Amino acid sequence: MTRDDLDSFDHAILRILRLDGRISVTELANQISLSKSPTQARLKRLEREGFITGYQALLDHQRLGLGHVVFVEVRLTDTRESALREFNMAVNATPEIEECHMIAGAFDYLIKVRSADIHDYRLILAERISSLPHVASTSTHVAMESVKESGR
């Protein structure tokens, strides 16, 4: 199944779930103007076919003491496939890294990191990020305010 196989009801379900993953099937059905059974069947199909890959809670990072956000440009010493695989595996094993994207441009990866404060981040950079495989250099950009996050 491809995205071309999705109809307007499927797209509506995905749009609503993106904003509220905890919505009840009954309320979802009401919002898309279908009865509960076909809505539930569509939801199960979208999960089974991989259009919905999971559900997660959105956290209040400030209250959890993780309000400090930085973006790190990473340049690698080696960009052959084996080096990229090693770097990617190490990133996935690093809990402090919230997001990591391969970039086409002046650097190789852009990493998003959350920490308690700048001191905590400096330790994460020194002990974790700089020691990732094939890292040649990093450049840090501190976020002053998060205006929009998590697709909201």
Image (spheres, rainbow, N blue to C red):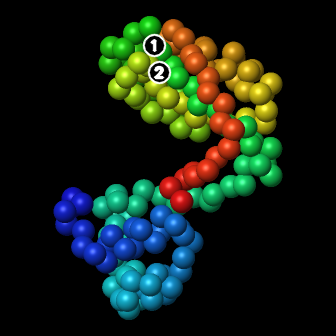
At 45% from the left and 13% from the top, the residue drawn is: 76
Q: Nearer the viewer, mark 1 or mark 2?
A: 1
Give the residue type at disc 1.
Answer: Leu
**Distance (Cα) linking label 1 and label 2:** 9 Å
Residue occupied by mark 2: 87
Q: Is residue 118 left or right of residue 107?
A: right
* In the image, residue 86 above or below residue 55: above
Q: Percent from the top left, x then y, of residue 20?
A: 54, 69
Q: Percent from the top left, x then y, of residue 26?
A: 49, 87
At 36% from the left and 14% from the top, the residue drawn is: 79
Residue occupied by mark 1: 76
Callout 2: SS:
helix
* In the image, residue 105 above or below residue 36: above
Q: Quarter of the image holding residue 50?
A: bottom left
- Which of the image's four quarters has the N terminus? bottom left
Q: Quarter of the image holding residue 68?
A: top right
